[in-house]
Image (cartoon, coloured by chain):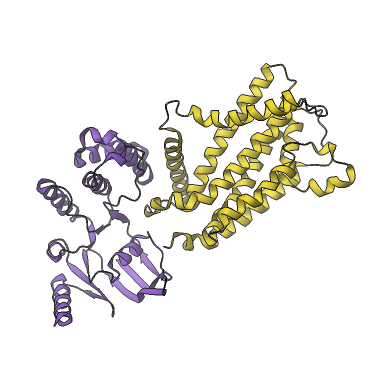
Amino acid sequence: MIELRNLTKTYKTPSGRHRVLDDVCLTIPSGVSVGLIGRNGAGKSTLLRLIGGMDRPDSGQVLTRHSVSWPVGLASGFQGSMTGRENVKFVARLYCEPWQVRQKIDFVADFAELGAYFDMPIKTYSSGMRSRLGFGLSMAFDFDYYLVDEVTAVGDARFKRKSAELIRQKRQHSQFLMVSHSLGEIKKFCDAGLLVGSDGVRYFDHVDQAIRIFEEQQHAYLA
Amino acid sequence: MRRAWSLFCTAVHALLLRELKTRFGEYRLGYLWALLEPLAHLAMLLLIFGVFMHRVMPEISFPVFLVNGIVPYLLFSGMCNRALHALEANRGLFCYRALRPIDALLARSLLELLVYAAVYLLLMTVLGLAGEALSGDKLLLLAACWLLLFLLSFGLALVFMVTAHAFKAADKLLPMLMKPLYLISGVMFSIHVVPAEYRGLLDWNPLLQAFELMRHAVCPSYPLYDLSLGSLACWALALLCLGLALYKGREPAMLRS
């Protein structure tokens, strides 16, 4: 269960403070994966970052007893002059016992399929290689909730299949909170939906319902 | 509580190894550079003041005097200057919730301590082998001075990190304000050459206290006047508390984008 209590978040802009989230109160029940749906700039990613603790709200709280991942595939934590292996080792030292470090490194090396590049500095990687490493790194650890911000579409068709299969396996024990521009993807991986709009954030038990209302809004806007 | 402490240690350990690797791992001579840089700085000063200017000090040889001022001063200023950029340099890392700004700052500070303690030991060994009269009777005092100097510097580094985040101009202003400290902290002069009536203007300075105590510790005949470890300890404690309190209050703001 994740409880959002009076969450307010603003950003500084040249023309004053821009309010992204205004006094959001809602509860995400245990055991459901949630897709965050909304237009660009509505605050989906902001909400995800607040839930993950990567950013702090102006006021209000995120309450949960579960472990929450960093955004899956995130590359901002990587140090360009260190090799893939060294970067993975660094995170493994933080998130698991010393005796598990080796096993985590082996998992990422095997999953990301970087070959010799695994031992080269990350700044030599292509963006695809970087995301593969990031995705593998997140999946190496067990979290109750994985945060996903537009990354499942990484790599070639075979890698995508492999990733989807891994997510499906993880879904047996963990949940996903997902932002994606592809509604199809959200439908595939999520049970419930959070509709993030200018009029606030609403929770729907069924993701289909959230998508339907979102699409109606879009049509009304176009018409 | 115990879990929090072990998480803290894990985070600092991982960050320390990372800093070591990113700062020196790329170079051919690797970690040796960590020592060579300050060694070169010191060698030059020793050459200028010791050999060319023939400075002499009461009851202590000039190189020993200088090493016991410059090396600890470099530790202090290194920690403070690195604190100004600790937050921005590690910004990307705070997406890992196990890491907090204070972890990053402590890792950087410990690295500085490691480097300068090694430089210090190396130089003192060389000086000892070169026939300088050094005493090992007050090693405990020497260790206490280093520890207190580290705590004091860490307290101030915390203040600097918080200030640099709150005010953009701080990373230009603070180094400027620090410069005079080099001159009044007794790096280059001994408190003895100051007439007794003016000593009170200078001996409140905890850096000067630390350097004079260190000199006394390696050369017990070097007089102390009324400087004491107690006063240095009070300074260290006060600055550490101030730094931690400011940090505690500003931590959420530092993690907010």
Quadrant in the picture for residue A99: top left
Chain A rendering hue = purple
Task: Judge whether residue A32 can be spotted in this image.
Answer: no
A102 above or below B239? above
A171 above or below B13? below
Q: What's the residue at 61%, 39% (across, down)?
A: B75
Q: What's the residue at 29%, 64% (across, down)?
A: A45
Query: What percent of the width, then of the height, locates residue B65?
Result: 74, 30
Taking depth in this image into account, of A91 and A103 the one nearest to the observer is A91
Count of residue discs: 0
Query: What percent of the width, then of the height, locates residue B187?
Result: 72, 37
Q: Is residue B64 left or right of residue B83?
A: right
Q: Is residue A123 left or right of residue B212?
A: left
Chain rendered yellow: B
Taking depth in this image into account, of A93 and A122 the one nearest to the observer is A122
Q: What's the residue at 19%, 73% (across, down)?
A: A205
